[in-house]
Amino acid sequence: MKVAVLGASGRAGSEITKELASRGHEVLAIARNPDAIPAQSGVTVRAGDASKPDELADLIRGSDAVISALHFDVPAATLLGALRAAGVHRLLVTGGAASLEIAPGQRVIDTPSFPAEWKPIAEGGIAFLDDIRSERDIDWVFFSPAALLFEGPRLGHYRLGGDRLVTDENGESKISFADYAIAMVDELERKAHSRERFTAAY
């Protein structure tokens, strides 16, 4: 499968790029700073700015799917417009955990312990998810990670969830970037979700 990864130089994007290449996919790794992307077999690196939809459409044209590992300073409408212009019909988004529920009607962002300094970024992710939910032409998924996404070993396992935060027996919600990447590429290949959000954690 030919897959374009946006934000391929970041922590999530770099692990997703690596996982895709290890499974034999043809990867187009796009970043504003392409020099930060290491050379890998099966990976073509290109400079690109996802906030410029015409430029992005030219880059991703011919891809089977796009995986966005961007921050939420690029609105959903901009990305969706670029995909439509390029004729790409599948989008997988690296989301945030803040909008996941810990109880009916109570989201992670609503808890007293949620850091105030994280709220602007988290609210961007929530707005992106709200905007993309009405999309009916492009087949999208929004993959919220665990509450703690960290640099750690590739364990090769995870548990899936929907709109509810996944926690372990100690009440912790966490996953490494490497295992998050496994779950993302599994979703790409298996297409278990369509026009919905899901999550994963240990």
Image: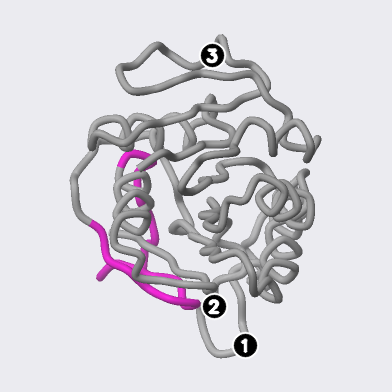
In the image, 108: left or right of 180?
A: right
For residue 56, above or below residue 67: above
Task: Please state the horizontal and vertical placement of residue 150, each as a whole percent of the image.
Answer: 41, 40
Of the numbered discs 3 and 2, the one sitting upstream in the chain is 3
**Among the two numbered marks 1 and 3 on one chain, the one whose residue lies closer to the N terminus:** 3
Residue type, mark 3 in image: Ala
**Which amino acid is tagged 1?**
Gly
Q: Secondary structure at mark 2?
A: strand
- For label 2, count other residues whose C-alpha is less than 10 Å away and answer few (under 14), some (14-19) or many (20+): some
Residue that numbered label 2 is attached to: 101
The type of colouring in the image is: one colour
Marks 3/2: CA distance? Answer: 35 Å
The residue drawn where x is 51% and y is 64% is 141
Q: Position of residue 70 (x, y in %)?
A: 63, 41
Q: Are marks 1 and 3 in contact (CB under 8 Å)?
A: no
The vertical placement of 22 against 128, above or below, is above
Name the quarter where the N terminus is drawn: top left
Residues at marks 1 and 2 touching, judged by CB atoms closer than 8 Å: yes
> Residue 162: within the magenta?
yes
Magenta highlight range: 158-178
Residue at the spot of label 1: 105
In the figure, is residue 185 to the left or right of 12? Answer: left
Q: Which residue is mark 3?
A: 36
Q: Position of residue 127 (x, y in %)?
A: 76, 64
Residue, x 30% and y 30% (percent of image)?
21
Q: In the rendered structure, which amino acid carries the disc numbered 2?
A: Glu
Give 138 or 35, whichever is nearer the viewer.
Answer: 138
* Residue 102 placement, left or right of 174: right
Q: Position of residue 167 (x, y in %)?
A: 35, 69
